[in-house]
Amino acid sequence: MVCWNSLKVVELVEGDPIKNVLYVDLTRRRYWIEERNDLFQKYIGGSGVAIKLLLEECRRGVDPLSPENPIVFAVGPLNCVFPMASKTVAMFKSPLTGNLGESHAGGRSGIALRSAGLGALVIRGASDTPIYLSIYDGKASFRDARVLWGMRSSYTVGRVIREREPKAGLRTIMRIGRAGERMVRYACVITETYRHFGRLGLGAVFGSKKLKALAIAGTNNIKVKDIKAYKELYQEIFKSEITAPALKKYHDIGTPMNVMPLNKLQALPAYNLKSASLDGAEQISGENLARNYLGRRVACGHCPVSCIHLAALREPYEKEPYFYKTTMISYDYEPIYALGSMLGITSPEGLLKLIDEVEVAGLDAMSCGVALAWATEAVEKSVVSSGPDGTIVNLRWGDYNAYIKAVEYIVEQPNEFYKALAHGVEYAATKYGGLEYALTFGGNEMPGYHTGPAAHIGYLTGARHSHLDSAGYSLDQKILASKGEPTPTSVANTLFEEEAWRQILSSLVVCFFAREIYKPEVVQKALKVVGWDLSLEDMKKIGYEILALKHEFKRREGFKADALRIPKRILETPTPFGRLDEAFIRDAVKEYFARLPRSTNQP
């Protein structure tokens, strides 16, 4: 177990508004700003500050869909200053897992919060009627959103707010769809268009507060301590980003470039992971989508990579020849895995239509796809019956029209089965059966990598149960390339150190795609330029502390590491390492949690 006595307290640059935390009480329709130097001086920003605020604001054992569950947004000292420091961290108690809810999104959210003169935003209480919040230069207005509530498309909601709110191009607009209104436990929050606070149900928490949207903008400038050193380091980082081969691939093809290598590796989950490869995967690959459907590329604010790829889907009007409806649809690797290969869909048009339906409703694509995959196998095995009246859709692998109908039912919840499915796979499988092929880890639906033991150990041990917590999928591929022989101890130690370091990146808040550029030495230089003097050892301690605080919250809300369920299916379907050994996984999980420190909050 890692131990330390104290964290370094840094001096903030005079006049830096990052210390400002805006508190908004939806119940009383009040707001105020508090200067919280204490948080930013010790925990940097982003994840570090957000977890401290969550521990302060969220009472033990609250219902995640009650007014007592707070929403915290936080940014860091590199937002608005260096390229690819473009994200915002959201924290809340998750209605999907019942413990830590953490989600990151880009778009213009990070820049907008910093420009509004804020380091963090805390939303308390609940409104009695639908509203949206408009925040400009730290002042909040409560807008009537009754006309937006129930609107079918999340795109339309964004369009209406864009017309009403000032500062186009500088603002962020976060909003929920009907899935959030109806509190589907894996509803997302869409920011701008095509970016999401996707995982763990932030959209449902918005819906429980009758909070339809959040618009933020401002005019604050960010000061740096040493302008000459800033310009030099900025150019160094920027040049690295536009010349890095991995980031060029993200620009050219986007994250769907992963489809074919994973399929070749036999690591692409398909048919609810009954298989680790998909015949016809080339049809839904990044290369094929780019060749035949790519309409344009989009970037988050202050990012030169433009990894967001939009397909232009043309559909003819039935009664008007030579007239077409063109829909721009964002596609990434994760929705292609969850709504494509996991469902046996190889039709690009069918996949894009299903992705669009999920976007319109405001659902997390990964959880939704894994839920549909479990439901398909449940129908296939007669665990549930499709029924003569069609109230349970007769799902068949590859039938995208049936899946589009099922998405509608998940949102509308017309019967007990879809009400259960709207609670997530773990809940539905516990109620109806089929836990052995219910692909959830700590209650969160599986990401799209079946690369080997490290991927699944990372899903089990990660604070969010996400592939992004410790990148086990990447560790598996490195071990394969080096022909190494992993042990439970080596895997646990590597995942732990990676997740601890990522607490620093998510406190700055830097996009994880830039993790090979923002190495510890570069982060140290960047922080010094903005006036933060931290040694490499200081950062290491802070990373451990933030990770410890997250697990403190999880334990407090009932999470038990020794009760983690390992889905039987991941042991049945061979990985590139062959069949996984359950004992190996359990040993590594045990070693990981043995390394986890206790926070300085605890005796």
Image (cartoon, rainbow, N blue to C red):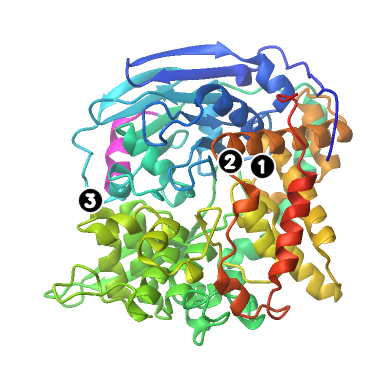
- What is the spatial separation of the Cα atoms under label 1 and label 2, in whole angstroms? 6 Å
Which is nearer the N-term, disc 2 or disc 3? 2
> In the rendered image, is residue 517 in sight?
no
Q: Please tell me how crowded label 1 is: few (under 14), some (14-19), or many (20+) other residues with Cα within 10 Å.
A: many
| Image x and y of residue 215, in percent | 39, 31
Residue at (24% x, 75% y) in the render: 386
> Eyeballing the image, is 284 above or below 360?
below
Q: Please state which amino acid type lies under the numbered disc 3.
A: Arg
Q: Please state which amino acid type lies under the numbered disc 2.
A: Lys
Boundaries of the magenta span: 156-166
> In the rendered image, is residue 403 in sight?
yes
Query: Tag on residue 463?
Result: none
Q: Answer whether labels 1 and 2 touch (C-beta < 8 Å).
A: yes
* Viewer-closest of 395 and 159: 395
Query: Tag on residue 152?
Result: 3
Q: Please tell me how crowded label 2 is: few (under 14), some (14-19), or many (20+) other residues with Cα within 10 Å.
A: many
Q: Please state which amino acid type lies under the numbered disc 1.
A: Val
Does 163 appear in magenta? yes
The residue singled out by tag 1 in the image is 510
The residue singled out by tag 2 in the image is 87
Residue at (57% x, 17% y) in the render: 20
| Image x and y of residue 127, in percent | 29, 25
Q: Quadrant of residue 450?
A: bottom right
